[in-house]
Amino acid sequence: MVYKNIMALGYIILDSGKEFIVVSEQKKITAFEYGQFCLSVCNMDYDKTEERVQMYSEKNYEIKDMLSHCINSLYLTWEQANVVIEMIAEEINENGVIVGGVDSLPDIYKNKELRHHIRKLLERDFSVCESEIQSELDSVILNQSIIMFDGVPMTGYFLNTIKDFLIVDVQKFLLSNCVIKECEYCKRLFIPSRKSDKYCRLPNLERLTCGELAHKNRSKTDFERLCDKARPEQRSTLINISTTKKYDVDILQQMYDDWSLECGKQYKKYKAKNDLGGFKKWIEKTKYTPSKIKNEYQKRLKTKENVKR
Ligand SMILES: [Zn+2]
């Protein structure tokens, strides 16, 4: 057997009975708790990944640099994220794909159905086992062998694709007593520390936990809710895959920042007058449209050029 063929990704995953030990060239690189890897895959935001892969490949980033921006490492330690990035880069390399969009990533990161399937399995909804996806997963032949590590025999898996890791991880997770829940705030999957946990403790962009955010949301005023809805909407109208193709992203960002600052001022002004309707109107009036973006962009470009002269 050709060595390369049985271990295309260059890693062996050892099952210690408590966790997975990732080994390369007979050295321990890092460890994963059962279920940790599949959770990180299920929790990835498909649309954001797509946006980032496209953005960074257009900027001619090296594959690994690009992946480090795209593969959501929020759920993994730095060492674990690095291993995953190496595996993906190796798989892309093996397949000889040119990285352009999310389509060039391995199946587990782009196949929404597969991810939905894994999610259901983790939630122990076994009705999905009748599906075609499950028979495809069952037909994957895993290369495994008993391997001595630190004088202890363990089951070692030679990874051909990163999907092999996902399959083994799901299997081990389902055999464990671990339970997975969906966070009532962010809808991501998490392993609860207590049975009654409703919210995850996964990191958020704001430095608050989901429990704190849920509480804050309950006590929010109508003014705050309007603001919270308008900001991401305006941002995604201004900065998305199609606008960044046409316009310089720094200028778009500046346009958003200026609007957002003004939004904060208007919020205070209307709140002081308790005029919710007026604030709503202001938001509607200042919403960007393709033609407004074009006009404002050209105006800013001209000023920029004038400054240069
Ligand atoms: Zn959450």
Image (cartoon, grey):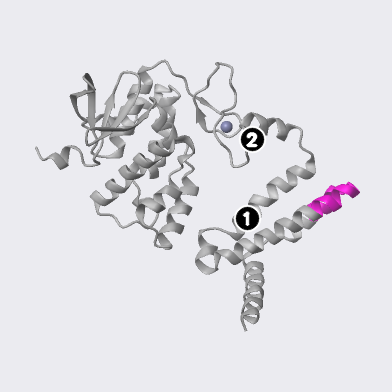
Q: Label 2, label 1: how many angstroms apart (C-alpha)?
A: 22 Å
Question: What label sits on residue 122 in the rendered view?
Answer: none
* Residue 308 point in image, percent of width and height: 61, 80
Q: Secondary structure at mark 1?
A: helix
Q: Answer yes or no: do the residues labelled 2 and 1 have beta carbons within 8 Å?
A: no
At 16% from the left and 41% from the top, the residue drawn is 5
Taking the image in four quarters, ligand 1 sits in the one at top right
Q: Is residue 132 visible?
A: no
Residue that mark 1 sits on = 235
* Residue 255 point in image, percent of width and height: 66, 63
Taking 101 as reference, is 308 above or below it?
below
Q: Upstream in the sequence, badge 2 or badge 1?
A: 2
User: Is 80 left or right of 158, judged from the image as shown?
Assistant: right
- Amino acid at the residue labelled 1: Arg
Q: Nearer the viewer, residue 106 or 89?
A: 89
User: Is 226 left or right of 63, judged from the image as shown?
Assistant: right
Residue that mark 2 sits on = 208
Q: Quadrant of residue 218?
A: top right
Span of residues in magenta: 266-281
At 58% from the left and 38% from the top, the residue drawn is 204
In the image, residue 77 lies in the stretch drawn in magenta: no
Task: Say whether mark 2 is within 8 Å of ligand 1.
Answer: no
